[in-house]
Amino acid sequence: MNIGDSILEFKKKLPPGVRLIAVSKTKPEDLILEAYNAGHKIFGENKAQELSRKYNNLPKDIVWHMIGHLQSNKVKYIAPFVSVIHSVDSLKLLQAINKEAEKNGRIIDCLFQLKIAREETKFGMEPEEIKSILLSDEYRTMKNIRIIGLMGMATFTDNQQQIITEFKFLHDTFFSLQREFFQGVNYFRERSMGMSDDYTLAVQEGSTMVRIGSLIFGQRNIIN
């Protein structure tokens, strides 16, 4: 099955309201074009400079999502065009995104990355850290970012109950934040959770965006 067929088959599995982010990190541009030519336009990358290069070389109606850990000094590479940044894990990063978005005359949609996994290697914030940002004077002055939801990465484990518990935690935290900080707005609605190994559990627990790479493109290529 080619990449175009894989995309179409995968989309059939997703219920209404769940968007597919095709994770194209480390993949060559010709493979991204195969998916694009099959009608898919939403792609996720995890390195700012690689994302910038692909943006410059590929069709301009592609919707790019930054899904990887993002350093504040790398925001400038993607601020002119990125659609959504999934991995906001500090006030410092949010301030950098707001600054670069303002320079480019844009408002950039962002997701707070919630730490849901038990693995120390996973990035993300605790709910209280997110609340602290939302209550801060610094946040209130930001005019060029828009918080549209939460992203989380579950523990890499065969224990499905643990994964379900972690996704439920994101789901519950999302609705708690919505009630406290985002009542009356229609843009705070995204729960970005679920990858190739656990997306079915994520969808079951209320995901609105799944980040799928290997099920579409095959095992990832390692590039320098």
Image (cartoon, helix red, strand yellow):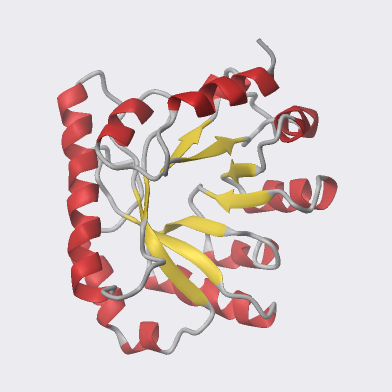
Residue 142 coordinates in the image, percent (x, y): 46, 84
Horizontal arrangement in the rendering, residue 146 relative to residue 107 (left or right) = left
- 22 is higher (above) or lower (below) than 68: above
Where in the figure is residue 29, as x and y percent of width and height? Answer: 78, 34
Quarter of the C terminus within the rendering: top right
Residue 135, horizontal then vertical, whole percent: 25, 81
Residue sitting at x 48%, y 37%: 211
Q: Is residue 23 above or below residue 73?
A: above
Q: Kindly give the residue lying farthest to the top in the view shown.
A: 1
Position of residue 121 in the picture relative to residue 212 (left or right):
left
Question: Where in the figure is residue 17, as x and y percent of width and height?
Answer: 42, 44
Q: Which residue occupies 33% across, 89% down?
A: 137
Left or right: where does residue 59 sit relative to residue 131?
right
The quarter of the picture where residue 189 lies is bottom left
- Number of numbered discs overlaid on the protein picture: 0
Pick the quarter of the image with the N terminus: top right
Can you see residue 126? Answer: no
For residue 189, say whether it is visible.
Answer: yes
The furthest residue to the right: 57
Q: Kindly identify the residue that appears in the image at 39 percent across and 45 percent down.
A: 208
Q: Is residue 129 above or below residue 37?
A: below
In the image: residue 176, left or right of residue 110: left
Position of residue 82 relative to residue 101, above or below, is: above
